[in-house]
Image (spheres, grey):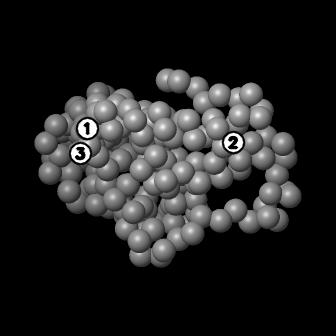
């Protein structure tokens, strides 16, 4: 499969296969990130498609090859935000869907509901940290915010989740 840097270099030279391999490496992370932001399969598909097309067209603008993951995630988040602004999506969970889920499905829906209840800046910080896998410094650079602000948002988001959703059950949000 080759190293990330080698694949990016090949893709920049027009190697379509190398670009496909790059995208496949991050497909799951991109999907989970988009789904957490949009919570709608059709919008997720649109955002991912737009992201891949934009990334392919603008790959030459990537300055540091090792940051491909961060770069494509930023494109995805921008596409998701555009869709949210365009569609004025409201994150709603259908009650019929709740009735069809098993117990483990309820936990997933409860977590999604808890994340969706957070302010956008808190939710985005949690998604970038836990789903995308960026560290505080990378999130800080990505969002152009001070590291202290990112740490504060992560801490407050976890505190809100602990106090509002998981206090009674004795479940604590894991520290990474």
Mark 3 lies on a secondary structure that is loop
- Residue at far front of view: 163
Residue beneath the point at 63% across and 48% down: 114
Residue 173 is drawn in which quadrant? Answer: top right
Query: How many numbered markers are drawn?
Result: 3
Mark 1 lies on a secondary structure that is loop
Q: Is residue 141 visible?
A: yes
**Residue 29, horizontal then vertical, whole percent:** 47, 42
Q: CA distance from mark 1 to mark 3?
A: 7 Å
Mark 1, Cα crowd under 10 Å, few <14 / some 14-19 / many 20+, is some
Residue named by callout 1: 146
Residue beneath the point at 58% across and 26% down: 174
Residue named by callout 3: 144
**Residue 41, horizontal then vertical, whole percent:** 58, 62
Residue beneath the point at 80% across and 57% down: 98
Mark 3, Cα crowd under 10 Å, few <14 / some 14-19 / many 20+, is few
Q: Is residue 146 above or below residue 72?
A: above
**Residue 172, horizontal then vertical, whole percent:** 65, 28
């Amino acid at each position: 499969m080759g190293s990330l840097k080698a694949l990016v270099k090949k893709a920049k030279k027009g190697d379509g296969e190398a670009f496909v391999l790059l995208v496949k490496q991050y497909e799951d992370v991109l999907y989970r990130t988009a789904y957490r932001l949009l919570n709608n399969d059709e919008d997720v598909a649109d955002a991912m498609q737009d992201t891949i097309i934009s990334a392919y067209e603008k790959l030459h603008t990537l300055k540091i090859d090792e940051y491909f993951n961060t770069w494509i995630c930023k494109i995805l988040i921008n596409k998701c935000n555009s869709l949210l602004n365009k569609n004025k999506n409201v994150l709603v969970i259908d009650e019929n869907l709740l009735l069809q889920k098993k117990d483990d499905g309820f936990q997933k829906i409860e977590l999604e509901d808890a994340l969706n209840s957070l302010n956008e800046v808190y939710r985005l910080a949690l998604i970038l940290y836990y789903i995308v896998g960026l560290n505080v410094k990378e999130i800080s650079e990505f969002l152009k915010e001070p590291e202290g602000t990112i740490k504060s948002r992560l801490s407050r988001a976890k505190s809100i989740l602990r106090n509002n959703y998981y206090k009674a059950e004795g479940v604590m949000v894991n520290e990474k």
